[in-house]
Amino acid sequence: MELSVIISSSNQDVNCLNRTLTGYANQKFSDFELILAGLPPNQAVKDLLKSFNRVFHSIKILEPATNMAAVLNEAIQQSEADYLVFTKSNCIPRNDFLEIHHQRKEETFFLSGGHFRLPPSIYQDLQLDHINQQTCFELRWLKRQGLKFSLKNQQLSKNKIKSNIINALLPGKAVWNPHNVSCWKKDLLDINGFDEQITMQADQVKDLSQRLQNNDIKGIKVHFNAICLHLNQQDIQKPAGLNSAQPALKTIRTGKPAWTNYGIYKGQPVRVPYTELDQG
């Protein structure tokens, strides 16, 4: 197994999940497993997944936990591949999405992709045939559906040279984007995965991204190469009053620790090579 694709879900929109899985059923690169993290185990979801049983090598389902960090840590542990791709259940991948993540992977780096937001007026009318035929990734088709002009529309360009140039010109650092990101499994185990004490998903992502950098794991931008369509829905978030991450985030920026005591391996106060931990 070359890739493990971890798809996090924070809603019960079966139609949305169906579109996303259809996107993975059309991938050029086929040596991957799917891990659905935080998916509510209702009958509609079970019926949908049953229809995809013969399409994918493996589909694992992880039910919701105390927060998304705990589910993602479980997904990391259960993944069979050495290289992991993270995305969300409301992101439809273009047919070369996994191929690019696989081709561009590098030691000591993670790949930071982008997501092209579809307005509700377009995604509500999106049919499975549009995904199977890849017309939903074509600018001409999107414009006919009412997509407004924007420089961000160039993200859908299939010109590799053009995409590489735009990626190089983008300002800012490559950061962990939960909609479209990939990395080596060992690099996540070496920092003990996600911090489960942090409640807000946005802060969990910031914490993980910073600790990867503290451990000399840098990001590479593939925003205009690895493409997925984001069905523009509001992710479920906990109220702001429950957020207690700011002191922790300040600490990891100043003290530059890589390891968290509240990740995959509980009660492990110091960083240990993940192979030793796996061996007990």
Image (spheres, grey):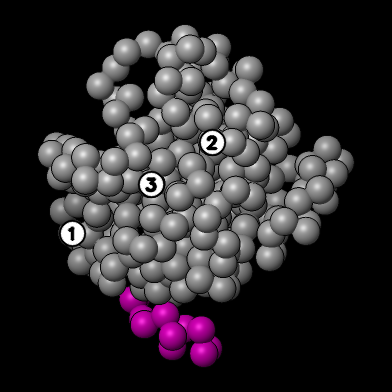
Question: Type of residue at label 3?
Answer: Ala
Q: Which mark is residue 226?
A: 3
Question: Does residue 223 appear in the picture of this structure?
Answer: no
86, above or below 128, in the image: below
The residue under label 2 is which amino acid type?
Gln
Which corner quadrant of the image does residue 211 belong to? bottom left
As drawn, is 253 to the left or to the right of 80? Answer: left
First in sequence, mark 3 or 2: give its number: 2
Q: Which mark is residue 134?
A: 2
How far apart are the two marked residues, 3 and 1, measured between alpha carbons?
A: 33 Å
Q: Nearer the viewer, mark 1 or mark 2?
A: 2
Which badge, 3 or 1, comes first in the chain's sequence? Answer: 3
Quadrant of the rendered structure where residue 121 is?
A: top right
Q: CA distance from mark 3 to mark 2?
A: 14 Å
Disc 3 packing (10 Å; few <14; some 14–19; many ≥20): many
Q: Residue at x 42, y 80 (%)?
A: 274
Disc 1 on helix, strand or loop? loop
In the image, residue 123 lies at what x, y percent?
57, 21
Q: Is residue 121 above or below residue 83?
A: above
Residue 242 on the magenta segment: no
Any part of residue 105 in sight: yes
The quarter of the picture where residue 148 lies is: top left
Along the line of sight, the residue nearer the viewer: 20 or 158: 158
- Left or right of 51 in this view: 8: left
Residue 210, horizontal then vertical, whole percent: 26, 53
Magenta-drawn segment: 269-280
Q: CA distance from mark 1 to mark 2?
A: 47 Å
What residue does disc 1 label? 255
Residue 26: image location, x then y, percent? 60, 48
